[in-house]
């Protein structure tokens, strides 16, 4: 029995969308290793991917009665939810860490940071740079204790 173009298309579609479930893993690992609150991850993008996959689950179940397709897209939806959850967790941890640092080094007017600004002639206007300086300062001080 020869393979029809429709069968070939379905096979490629199934293979690609099954493989896509595993393609989420590198993104999850990157979020797990991130130390800056996973700021490069877009909630909007991943939520839209998730909703799109969920709508495909509904299509697979209610329109074409294809439970295999529904299972693949349900797994894709789950992966999007995991990415959103990991991102929320990393941002919450990062924010909590910054609050602790704010208490330890209250402002960019700390003598060590202010001295650096006077030497270089720059000011700390970038919030990320300010946080990085604080992280470095607290790390240096805790290493000296």
Image (cartoon, helix red, strand yellow):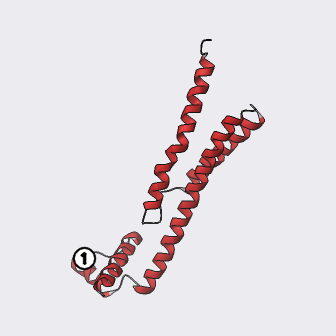
* Secondary element at tag 1: loop
In the rendered image of this protein, does residue 28 appear above or below residue 124?
above
In the picture as drawn, the residue positioned furthest to the front comes out as 1
Q: Quadrant of residue 56?
A: top right
Q: Seen in the image, is 78 located left or right of residue 104? A: right
All told, the count of numbered labels is: 1
Seen at 48% across and 52% down, the residue is: 27
Does residue 121 appear left or right of residue 139 in this picture? left
Depth check: give the residue in front, 21 or 123: 21
Look at the picture and state if 41 lies above or below 96. Answer: above
Q: Quadrant of residue 105?
A: bottom left
**Can residue 106 be seen by looking at this rendering?**
no
Q: Residue at x 43, y 62 (%)?
A: 34
**Residue for point 58% across, 50% down:** 79
Image position, residue 57 (x, y; %): 70, 41
Query: Disc 1 marks which residue?
Result: 121
Against 113, is 128 above or below? Answer: above
The C terminus - image quarter: bottom left
Q: Give left or right: position of 139 versus 73.
A: left
* Of 38 and 121, the residue lying toward us: 38
The quarter of the image holding the N terminus is: top right
């Amino acid at each position: 029995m020869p393979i029809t173009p429709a069968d070939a298309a379905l096979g490629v579609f199934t293979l690609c969308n099954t493989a896509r479930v595993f393609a989420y893993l590198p993104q999850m690992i990157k979020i797990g290793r991130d130390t800056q609150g996973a700021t490069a991850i877009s909630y909007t993008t991943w939520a839209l991917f998730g909703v799109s996959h969920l709508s495909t689950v509904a299509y697979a179940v209610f329109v074409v009665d294809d439970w295999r397709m529904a299972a693949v897209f349900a797994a894709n939806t789950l992966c999007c939810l995991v990415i959103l959850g990991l991102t929320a967790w990393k941002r919450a941890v990062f924010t909590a860490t910054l609050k602790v640092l704010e208490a330890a080094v209250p402002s960019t007017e700390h003598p060590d940071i202010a001295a650096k600004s006077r030497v270089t002639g720059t000011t700390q206007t970038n919030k990320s740079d300010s946080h990085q300086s604080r992280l470095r300062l607290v790390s240096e001080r805790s290493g000296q204790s």
